[in-house]
Image (tube, helix red, strand yellow):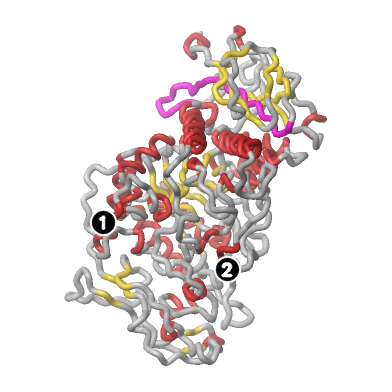
Amino acid sequence: MVFHCYLPACEPGQLYGFRVHGPYQPQQGHRFNPNKLAIDPYAKAIGRPLSWDASVFGYDITSADDRSYGGLDSAAHAPLAAVVDGAFTWGDDRPPRTPWHRTLIYETHVRGLTKMHPDVSADKRGTYAGLASEPVIAHLKRLGVTAIELMPVHCHIDDHTLVQAGRKNYWGYNTLSYFALHPEYASKNLPAAQLAEFKSMVRTLHAAGIEVILDVVYNHTCEGNQFGPSLSWRAIDNASYYKLSPEDSRYYMDFTGCGNMLNMQHPRVLQLIMDSLRYWVTECHVDGFRFDLASTLARELHEVNRLGAFFDIIHQDPVLSQVKLIAEPWDVGPGGYQVGNFPVLWTEWNGKYRDAIRKFWRGDGGQVSEMAERLCGSRDLYARTGRKPYASINFVTAHDGFPLHDLVSFNDKHNEANGEGNRDGSNDNFSWNCGAEGETNDPAVLRLRERQKRNLIATLLFSEGVPMILAGDELGHTQRGNNNAFCQDNDLTWLNWNLDDRKQSFLDFVTRCTRMFNQQPALQRRNFFLGRDIRGEGIKDVSFFEPSGRDMSDDAWSQSSTRCFGVRFAGDLIDEVDENGEPVVGDTLLLLINAGDDKVPFQLPPTRDDVKWELVIDTAAEDRDQHWTGESPFPLLGRSLALFLVPTPDISKMQD
């Protein structure tokens, strides 16, 4: 049932909330309590934040029994919705609509990106306006970023336990409203001004050719389990909005680890999510979404069903089926790890890519076959369902875990600052400290760390699929070993833009790699490699080589000691056409990879017409010749990567 009313005197700026009458029967799943002021689930702005108090809980917290009835009125402490006029002059704003195969994603936090940026005015640091400022746009353009993925901007609350401990929910995966922006990320206090600032940010980014993707959390809400507050959905209709335990409706199903999960079987819940998504696309012009713990959205009963109602509805929607859809393809429930199992139209954070690249460069044995599969777009995961290489969102680091600098600086997590005795955060980081744990002045260790960072970022950008860079990795950002900085709203997570020579050098290197990705069609394939001769010329579209220059043998693939190999991407055998129907051709690329400690003389494969290989990237940062003849040995240093190219012959002459 849907209730509605019209209040002609309710104008922009009006604060309001709902009181909902009904039975308070937790054992039957009902938690109505008209003493609790509830946020409108469709509120477009939050005009007053939550103030933690005993009154915001639906039960009597002094009894520590959620079946007790809370008689305190929460009006003085509950968050309030605000009426806003969303009118905005978009002008000639147009979505960039960058094709997936040309997309380069930059994952960032609105606040952390600019909170310490010296060239952003103080009043705009940490805000939507700061993100759209000229210095930030210039940085993103220099990096070649085509899409910025924002960690949650939906209004969220700080968990009660965090507030009591003097910390915040910095990441924001604790949603209070699926339509309202988080007010703290705006430079102005007025709700209407906050919405206009966000829209202006989107418009500015679009003008720079950069898409905006929102990280959205439709798997759970901020109300937690049966001991959580009654702020919105619980007070309005607990039994409809939430997935309750079939054994006892007092309790919540929880495959998110956050206390509850939305009831994806209820038509009004599905409508709420779809209305929210459409709002951000149609009214705020965003270009796509990354769905947090997306496996939860597929759980109609207990098991994950990748063709569930939620996915069917999105596929049929004329608006949402046209935007970028990214799944975090796992949750914490049984069978929740679903990498490779999402439907057509969806891309996925490829956790198998992350783990394979980390293990290989750490020096683990038996990783070369897995490494090769991930370099080529993870055909094993996506081809069987009719998807393309760009279904794989490739990443080495993300907000959850070590940033790149820490990945090569710590063997173990160091989360003591979170106040949980270092028990939180993953223990499986596949990291390597290069010989010293944490900060060090050892020049050999520091050199190796910088080389490992170059290896990891270059591998990311020279793999088939969609690369995603974590904001700050290009700046050498460190969280001092914290791999779960969700509650750190301070310089542990804010990016430091003051770069010394070493950090500036790494930024320059990352920029060179992103330029290669953006310029080379062989790195932006829309179809998987066939691994065979395409035109009867004796050359495959992709080839793998041993250091001897011979094709990789079965023994080389299977030996745990293999840590060095080469891969050639044939730029003249892409066998695709562009938007104008013209053949897609580019340079042929040769990637040499050595995760071992020793230098390897690598015999370069021959080239057409004896054209020389041009060395364009060398993570060893040695002073070398730039041109190498085919079948000559290249001294590939230990723990290094080298990228060569040869220009592709003129396609018109080839056709003649």
Give yes or no for residue 68 being in the magenta stretch: no
Q: Which residue does the image show at 57% across and 66% down from the upper left?
A: 256
Whether residue 73 is visible to the viewer of this picture, yes or no, is yes
Q: Which residue does the image show at 39% across and 39% down from the upper left?
A: 139
Whether residue 392 is visible to the viewer of this picture, yes or no, is no
The correct choice, above or below, for 458 with respect to 270 in the image is above
Give yes or no for residue 578 being in the magenta stretch: yes
Foreground residue among 488 and 325: 488
Dot 1: few (<14), some (14–19), or many (≥20) neighbours within 10 Å?
some
Q: Amino acid at mark 1?
A: Ala
Q: Which residues are magenta?
A: 577-597
The residue tagged 2 is 419
Residue 192 left/right relative to 443:
left
Residue 182: x and y in percent read: 37, 63
Dot 2 falls on a residue whose secondary structure is loop
Please give the label number shown on residue 21: none
Q: Main secondary structure of the magenta part?
A: loop
Quarter placement of the N terminus: bottom left
